[in-house]
Image (tube, rainbow, N blue to C red):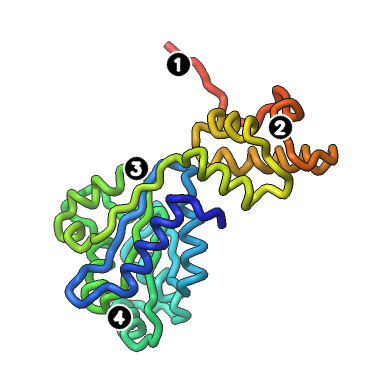
Amino acid sequence: LAKTKNVRNFLAVLNDLRVRPMGVEGMAILWGKPGEGKSTILAYATNIFNGIFIRAKRSWTMTSLLEAIIIELRGVPGRRRSQMEDWIEKRLMESREDRIIFVDEADYLFSRNMASNDMLDVLRDIYDSTGTPIILAGMENIARRIQEEGRFARRITSWVEFQGIDLDDARIVADTLCEVGVAGDLLAHMHRECKASIGNIVPALSRIENLGKTTGIETVDMAAWGDRPLYFAQPKFRRQS
């Protein structure tokens, strides 16, 4: 994993949540545009912290959420929601580890009727009963929607936004992921053309690496790269009148 500023900041937040003093809330929000590396860091953090990872889906209900958590805890889902919630809370309380619950695509936890967000309420109940840190990750507007849920928002101690990476971070990503050298002029070109999005930079580095390996170039620069496309962007269509 390339330790960009986004990554370092998020890992520091997780460490703070795990060792927080009594009386400090233990929930966090991670948000950003698509392609900023949110899902990648959640997968990494789940592994190093032995976390509980679930990915919300559009079709989910409260039952779906409880079943997903139970399966991650290596249990067997029951028939009644109250029983499943009680089982989850007991299992977390009995655990000798400081577990963290990571919820990716958390935008799907919101119902269209903001007055009734059952899945958020279930997570809040689990957190209140066990103190287990919970991290919700979603798109740009999830932080705003959480703020509108006052009962939930007051439990958030860390609001983490993943933004486009700067040129220094682009160098870290290139040195970490690319098995050939990337010259400074090509790095700056890539950062600009990829609009600072790590989701675009990663496939660009793969193409640079492939060129270097197939041609025997140890460090690829702009002269060697030429006018090749770095990644395949989505086509732009004119709006139909």
Q: Secondary structure at mark 2?
A: loop
Foreground mark, 4 or 3, reads: 3
Q: Which mark is residue 221?
A: 2
* Figure check: 76 above or below 201: below
At horizontal 64% and vertical 50% (from top left) the residue drawn is: 177
Mark 1 → mark 2, Cα distance in angstroms: 38 Å
Specify few, some or many for label 1: CA neighbours under 10 Å numbering under 14, 14-19, or 20 or more.
few
Q: Which mark is residue 140?
A: 3
Foreground mark, 2 or 3, reads: 2
**Quick check: 126 left or right of 57?**
left
Residue under numbered circle 4: 89
Mark 2 → mark 4, Cα distance in angstroms: 55 Å
* Figure check: 226 above or below 150: above
Foreground mark, 1 or 2, reads: 2
Q: Position of residue 67 (x, y in %)?
A: 40, 71
At horizontal 72% and vertical 49% (from top left) the residue drawn is: 179
Foreground mark, 4 or 1, reads: 4
